[in-house]
Amino acid sequence: MTEKDFLPGVYQKLLDNGKVTWKAPSNIALVKYWGKKPVQIPANPSISFTLDACATTTSVLFEKKDNNKALSFDLLFEGQPKDDFKPKIHTFLERVEKYVPFLKEYHFIIETSNSFPHSSGIASSASGMAALSMCLMDIERQLNPAMDDALFHAKASFLARLGSGSACRSIKSSLVQWGAHQNIPNSSDLYGVEYPFEVDSVFKSYCDTILLVHKGQKQISSTVGHQLMHGHPYAKNRFQQAFDNLDKLKSILASGNLKEFITVVESEALTLHAMMMTSMPYFMLMKPDTLEIINKIWQYREATKTPVCFTLDAGANVHLLYPEADKEKVLDFIKDELIEHCENGQYIHDRVGSGAIKINA
Ligand code: DP6
């Protein structure tokens, strides 16, 4: 599909008002998106596990308004008006208006809440933008009932990408690839697709325990971090490495070779942070406890041969990835050795999920 496919024709139906609710999960990248071109085009392809427990639920109430064609909406976060979130949502709505022109016809009340604690250091932009995009597509499908499922999901992902790149991987299916790659059929820079190759069953119930190392405000936002890949001395090699890692993952994911899986995933995490440390200006999001946890994981893996590994997103928290079959053992390891490195002992158990769902009123 191309950008033109996402421009709707004339809507077939008219609606005065309504309400839709969707819940969308967060995701954790195995091959990382870091670096982009305008508008929200990734510098390299990425792939992620969709999560299950970490999610945002968003309701959109819409009511036809008079001739005033300016965007108008109220925003409630966990039941309270949240004016500091409004500019981000406003920018998003302006950016997508061309593709969902009904936006000008209604006043919206957007109510949103997260399953994970606010300021846990877990980015809510992926799940938040995905949930809002699903709501917008649900409204559009009511105005245009002929729309098929393939277009519905691709366009939801396309809209979500315009809100936050990684959000386009939080729409549908458990392993999602985003970014054009010559060896991955139907891959696109415009939206995420279900990973099209064979995936061993071990990955279908993979666990992710998120160790909350540092819950404070980040020193540098992802948006700024992406920009710093422009003119970065290692950018070209890094982007090529991501393409190559996606090639490597093909046989790893098909065979369930956890040793090689761990090598790719941990290398991706450390490379992401190496890019931050070698940007100009340089910065570091890992904390001493992040490194303590990584070292303990390496020691534990060496000693017990349990295939547990880590990945990181743009922050200090550590995602511990492991097969469901090893859950008991790993939970003991977390309690005995890792909790002491978490802020207030906090962590969140999650696992691979399957994408956004509609919540019926
Ligand atoms: C490190 O999707 O948060 O988590 O497009 O500017 O909103 P924007 O960036 P964002 O970047 C995520 C970066 C990452 C890696 C990843 O999820 O692939």
Image (cartoon, rainbow, N blue to C red):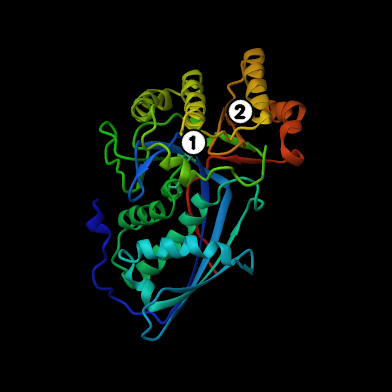
User: Which label number is shown at residue 169?
Assistant: none
Q: Nearer the viewer, residue 116 or 83?
A: 83
**Pointer 1 local density, CA inside 10 Å: few below 14, some 14–19, many at least 20:** few
Q: How many marks?
A: 2
**Pointer 2 local density, CA inside 10 Å: few below 14, some 14–19, many at least 20:** few
In the rendered image, residue 32, in percent from the top left (x then y), is placed at: 44, 35
User: Residue 301 appears in which quarter of the rendering?
Assistant: top right
Q: Of the residues shown, which amino acid type is indicated by label 1? A: Pro
User: Which label number is shown at residue 281?
Assistant: 1
Q: Is residue 303 above or below residue 6?
A: above
Q: Nearer the viewer, residue 223 or 196?
A: 223
User: Residue 237 appears in which quarter of the rendering?
Assistant: top left
For residue 227, side relative to residue 310 (left or right): left
Lower sequence index among marks 1 and 2: 1
Judged from the image, the secondary structure of the residue bearing numbered disc 2 is helix
Judged from the image, the secondary structure of the residue bearing numbered disc 1 is loop
In the rendered image, residue 259, in percent from the top left (x then y), is placed at: 50, 18
For residue 103, side relative to residue 19 (left or right): left
The residue positioned 47% from the left and 49% from the top of the image is 355
Q: Confirm or deny contact between disc 1 and disc 2 (CB under 8 A).
A: no
In the rendered image, residue 160, in percent from the top left (x then y), is placed at: 41, 54
Marks 1 and 2 sit apart, C-alpha to C-alpha, by: 43 Å
Q: Which residue is mark 2?
A: 325
Q: Nearer the viewer, mark 1 or mark 2?
A: 1
